[in-house]
Image (cartoon, rainbow, N blue to C red):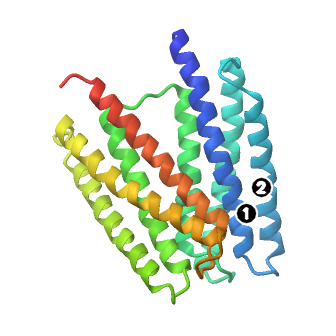
Amino acid sequence: MGSEHSISTFVTQSLEEIRFWSRIMKEHAFFLSLGFTADDTKLIQEAKHYIAIFERIEEQASEYNERTDPEVIRNFNIQVYQAAVSIWAYKRKVLGLILHCQINGNNFPLLVDHISREAFYFAKRLKELNEGKIKPLADAIIDENVFFLKIMADHSKFIGHLLDPSERKLVDQARGFSEDFDKLLYQAQDLDHMRPQSETKPLFEQFLDQNRVSVVSLRDFKKTARELIEECKIKSIIHPLLADHVFREASHFLEIIDAFDAHLSAQKA
Ligand SMILES: [Fe+2]
Ligand SMILES: [Fe+2]
């Protein structure tokens, strides 16, 4: 068993991850349900089943706090892990149906793939927490950035495609973000390929700074888009909740970047 400190970190981190991602998983199921055609009743029912599952998980998480017995949280993590793996399998099944042209609807294949990657990430985080695995900082910095830069690049593409084509200025801006994040993703992969030699503090600091600048501006763009959509000031088929959803995911990535920066600064030069 770890020290007092690591136990409370385990409980707090588990609850933080579960609170953030369960809401995200619930919303994915909701977005999928909106994108099916009316005759795909079975798939819609399955989506509703996942909405209920993750709603219950959210309620359960709200009953726990940092003083909850770590064993209770360990079991909770296993239960949520199973739900995350199950929704992942459902999303992959839907992706297969779309790619084999067995269903129609408005769910882009890239979006379904994207939300399945997020479910996989969530499941993996829960497994790592329960196994007490702490990745070396260098691995964590590169892996998390490669994951989230792709997520941000995808979001930019979804926004660009879901805005009405007549919103030419905004579509252009979304395309600009898409290109920006594709480049940042390539850079992150370059750094990954140059490992372990690329694992230097100055390179990592510059890498995080550069990523932060773009994530901040994408987050602000999403915030503006969310407000414009809520006030019905722009033409799009973006659900207001989707606008908020991608905004929250960008904010989450920024928190991760800041945490890495703090860890790096705490390290001796
Ligand atoms: Fe998402
Ligand atoms: Fe996302």
Residue 240 in view here: yes
46 relative to 7, above or below: below
Which one is nearer the viewer's eye here, 68 or 127? Answer: 68
Q: Tell me the kind of residue under disc 2.
A: Ile
Number of residues whose C-alpha sits closer than 10 Å to that of mark 2, classed few (under 14), some (14–19) or many (20 or more):
many
Percent of width and height locating residue 66: 65, 21
Report the front residue among 119 and 211. Answer: 211
- The earlier-in-sequence mark between 1 and 2 is 1
In contact (CB < 8 Å): disc 1 and disc 2: yes
Residue at 30% from the left image edge and 36% from the top image edge: 138
Q: Amino acid at mark 1?
A: Phe
Q: Which residue: 73% across, 72% down?
A: 34
Q: Which residue is mark 1?
A: 30
The answer to whether one can see residue 112 in this image is no
Q: Residues within 10 Å of mark 1 (few under 14, many from 20)?
A: some
Which residue lies under the disc numbered 2? 51
Left or right of 233? Residue 44 is right
